[in-house]
Each structure stands twice: as structure tokens, then as C-alpha cells.
Image (spheres, grey):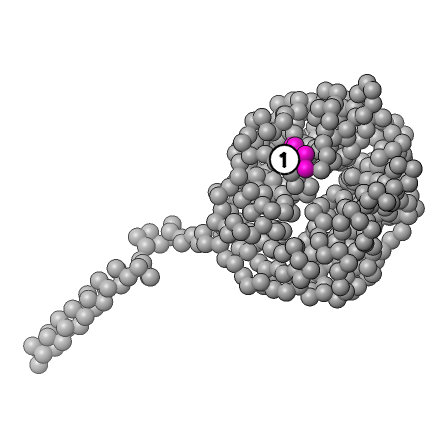
């Protein structure tokens, strides 16, 4: 009996040893030598199936214009807010909203239920502002609109402009259109607006840029926006930005000039501060900082890498349709402005309307994402910060034939991944889907 038991034991040991050898060479289920420090990183881009966009009202103008596109999150649900407009012609469409299925990317229009009504747009400009503008603790939506540039609409040689659009957020997670005297009831030709606390009372104010004798109109927030100051610094203001640029915990108003067409140019970048009725304005750049034929239509702030409490600025300028450049203030000296095309190989010459500043590769530096650059694949429209506030294109795994709208939806720092809502904007039957990309450095 003992010999039989010994034989059975030997047979069992041989079987176990044989199974162990097979497992150790199985490529599907490897046994890590140090399980606590080893992880499998999935760097494969995931493409979800195309989804047809569900419309509740047919398009008059099917193209999403390339600046005011915004994804917001309310009660755990993503909403896409977009303006459907064309620069030329006389056909008008609306500011529309869509609920986003964050799993499939399917878009279902809900303009009436979310925004409360279809608000006609001319040609909206600048990013959609999503901030609390009436001090009720609920974020609101504001969009500026400069209208169409169709010759047949001109009055006395000037384009007529258009009205702005403001939607106050409500406690039921919806919005209602709000009319504010001098803000949403008059046609003007705008390029830019910015929100921030310029009077240090703890709430958001709004500064509106306008072409003409009223370069900047300040709307103070007293449980709602109301006109306070019209300020004309004679600076050919083309773009405004409220930001604490010098790190003193006081918000500054930056005015960057558009094309200075006077016989003796005098426009510069201005830093403006308000103290009661006193306005202090300081020139912080050379005259015509972007050259005689270029003007700033947009500014963005990024971290100053030499002084962490300060900001550096990106200036987006144009000399006409299809003629665009990007400048940056020096981290060493805010008054010095650098043409980025002279210090980096990655630069833009067209299609740079709207962008987002975010850390795309999770390395702690501000990157630039050109959100809706039509005709460019994902890598072409991303600037990765090289660690010195100059930039290069990444080489993320992506299907380079995809060249419509990539809109960041969510990110996962632990997995090093970003999800994009991809929107096919080129036809009257738009489609959308989720594209999940590994972007970690």
C-alpha cells in the first residue's frame, strides 16, 4: 500500500510541474516577476461606432462654426452647446444643444428642453463663456456675436453686427434666455469678451470688446449683469482677457490691439486695473506688437514657467482670412512678445480660431489644443509643451483620415487616456462617436 501511495504522489507532482511550465510560458497570462510594480499599459486607440445625430429641428445651416463649441456637464450628463452659422450669405440658424451619450458619443438634440428656445445667431465669436454671472451659484452661458460679413447686408459701408446671447442657469439644470440692456439688445460688431472679478467684490464681471468708439464695455455683476463703464483707450482693441498676469492676486484686464489703421500707429498691449472710478492703464508691449498688418482676435493665459504665480499670454492674430499667426509673451519679461514661428517648428498659419489650454499628456505643463481645426488630424491640431512654453506636435496613435471636430470629453490621468467626442461636421447628416486615445507622456 505504501508503494502505491508513493507512486500516486509522484504522478501528481509530475502533473503539477507540467502545468506550471505551461503557465509560465503562456503569453496571454504572464506571471510578473514583481507583481506590485508591474502594470499593463493599454496604448491602443479605441474607436467607437458612428452614431447618427438626432435632430429635433432641421438645419438651415448645417455647419458648426469653429469658435463657440462647448461641452458642459450638468448633473452627471454631458451637453454639447454649438452655434450653427456661416460667415457669408443671409441664411441663419440657431444656437443649439445636444445631450451626449458619453459611452457611444451619440448626440440627441435638446435645444428646447435645455436652452428653452431656439436663439437665432448671426456669426458667433470667441469661446462660449460658462460661468456664474448673476451670483446665484449656478453657471450661466454667454456668447458674443458679430454677425455676417455679407456685402448685401452692409449699411453705410459697415457690417451691421448682431446681438449677443445670454442664458441664465436655473435650479432645474436648464437655462432661460435673458435680455440685458446694452448687452443683448443692440447689434454690434464684436470679436471678444472675458469674465472675471475686476472690482474685487468676489463675483464675476464681464468685459465686452467692440469695434468702434466703445472699445470696451464693462458689465458689473450685482446679482446680475448691468452696464457700468464704457472705456475707450484708443488702442484699436481687438481682444480682451481678464487674468492675474503679474501674480499680485488682483485681476488685470488685458487689451490687445487689432490692426492699427491710423496714419501714425500707436496701439500696444495694455494692462488695465480698476479702483473705484479710477482706471490705471499701463503699456506692456512695443507699438503695433504684431506688426502693422496683424491684429489680435483672441488671447489665452498659460503658466509662467519662470514665476509660477504669474501668467504668460498667447496672442492669436490675423491679417485676413487664412492669414494667421501666434505670438507669446516672454516668461522672463511680459512686455517682450515672441513670434512662435521663429522659435518652434510647430506653428499655425490658418484655422486657429478656438483652442483649449489643458495638460493633454499629464506632465504638468500647459498644452494647446485647437479644438475645431477643419482638415487636420488630431496630432496636427495639438501643441505639446516641451517644458519651456514652446511646443511640438505629438505622435498619438490616431487614424489620420479623421479631420473633423475633436472635442475633449473626459480624461483619466491614472490610465493616461483622453476621450474625445468626434463630430462629422461636413454633411447635412452629421454623425458622432467616441475616440479614446492614450496621450500620457
Outermost residue, bottom side: 1
Residue closer to the observer: 216 or 140: 216
- Which residue shows up at 13% across the image and 76% down it? 8
- Can you see residue 201? no
Q: Where is residue 356 in the image (x, y as percent from the top left)?
A: 65, 43
Residue closer to the observer: 200 or 332: 332
Asked which quadrant contains residue 207, the reply is top right
51 lies left or right of 32: right
- Residue under label 1, please give it: 349
- Which residue shows up at 24% across the image and 64% down it? 22
Q: Is mark 1 on a helix, strand or loop?
A: loop
- Which residues make up the magenta segment? 322-326
Q: Where is residue 425 in the image (x, y as percent from the top left)?
A: 66, 55
- Which residue shows up at 78% across the image and 39% down it? 191
Outermost residue, front side: 152
Asked which quadrant contains residue 175, the reply is bottom right
Amino acid at each position: 500500500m505504501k508503494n502505491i501511495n508513493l507512486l500516486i504522489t509522484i504522478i501528481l507532482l509530475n502533473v503539477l510541474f507540467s502545468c506550471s511550465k505551461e503557465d509560465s510560458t503562456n503569453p496571454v497570462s504572464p506571471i510578473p516577476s514583481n507583481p506590485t510594480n508591474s502594470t499593463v499599459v493599454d496604448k491602443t486607440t479605441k474607436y467607437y461606432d458612428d452614431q447618427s445625430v438626432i435632430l429635433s429641428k432641421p438645419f438651415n445651416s448645417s455647419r458648426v462654426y469653429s469658435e463657440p463649441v462647448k461641452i458642459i456637464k450638468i448633473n452627471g450628463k454631458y451637453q454639447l452647446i454649438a452655434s450653427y452659422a456661416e460667415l457669408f450669405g443671409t441664411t441663419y440658424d440657431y444656437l443649439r444643444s445636444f445631450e451626449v451619450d458619453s459611452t457611444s458619443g451619440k448626440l440627441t438634440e435638446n435645444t428646447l428642453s435645455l436652452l428653452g428656445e431656439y436663439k437665432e445667431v448671426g456669426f458667433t465669436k470667441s469661446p462660449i463663456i460658462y460661468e456664474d454671472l448673476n451670483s446665484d451659484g449656478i453657471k450661466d452661458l454667454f456668447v458674443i456675436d458679430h454677425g455676417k460679413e455679407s456685402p448685401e447686408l452692409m449699411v453705410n459701408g459697415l457690417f451691421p453686427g448682431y446681438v449677443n446671447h445670454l442664458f441664465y442657469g436655473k435650479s432645474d439644470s436648464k437655462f432661460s434666455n435673458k435680455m440685458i440692456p446694452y448687452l443683448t439688445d443692440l447689434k454690434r460688431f464684436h470679436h471678444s469678451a472675458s469674465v472675471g472679478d475686476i472690482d474685487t467684490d468676489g463675483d464675476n464681471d464681464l468685459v465686452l470688446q467692440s469695434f468702434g468708439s466703445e472699445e470696451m464695455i464693462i458689465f458689473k455683476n450685482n446679482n446680475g449683469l448691468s452696464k457700468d463703464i464704457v472705456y475707450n483707450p484708443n488702442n484699436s482693441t481687438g481682444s480682451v482677457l481678464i487674468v492675474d498676469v503679474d501674480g499680485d492676486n488682483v485681476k488685470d484686464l488685458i487689451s490687445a490691439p487689432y490692426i492699427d489703421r491710423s496714419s501714425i500707429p500707436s496701439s500696444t498691449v495694455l494692462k488695465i486695473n480698476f479702483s473705484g472710478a479710477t482706471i490705471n492703464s499701463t503699456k506692456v508691449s512695443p507699438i503695433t506688437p504684431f506688426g502693422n498688418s496683424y491684429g489680435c482676435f483672441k488671447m489665452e493665459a498659460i503658466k509662467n514657467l519662470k514665476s509660477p504665480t504669474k501668467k504668460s499670454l498667447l496672442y492669436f492674430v490675423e491679417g485676413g482670412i487664412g492669414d494667421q499667426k501666434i505670438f507669446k509673451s516672454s516668461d522672463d519679461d511680459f512686455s517682450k512678445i515672441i513670434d512662435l514661428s521663429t522659435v518652434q517648428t510647430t506653428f499655425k498659419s490658418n484655422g486657429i480660431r478656438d483652442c483649449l489650454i489643458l495638460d493633454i499628456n499629464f506632465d504638468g505643463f500647459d498644452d494647446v489644443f485647437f479644438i475645431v481645426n477643419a482638415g487636420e488630424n488630431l496630432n496636427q491640431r495639438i501643441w505639446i509643451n516641451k517644458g519651456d512654453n514652446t511646443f511640438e506636435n505629438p505622435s498619438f496613435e490616431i487614424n489620420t483620415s479623421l479631420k473633423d471636430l475633436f472635442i475633449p470629453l473626459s480624461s483619466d490621468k491614472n490610465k493616461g487616456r483622453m476621450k474625445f467626442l468626434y463630430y462629422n461636421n461636413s454633411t447635412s447628416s452629421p454623425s458622432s462617436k467616441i475616440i479614446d486615445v492614450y496621450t500620457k507622456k
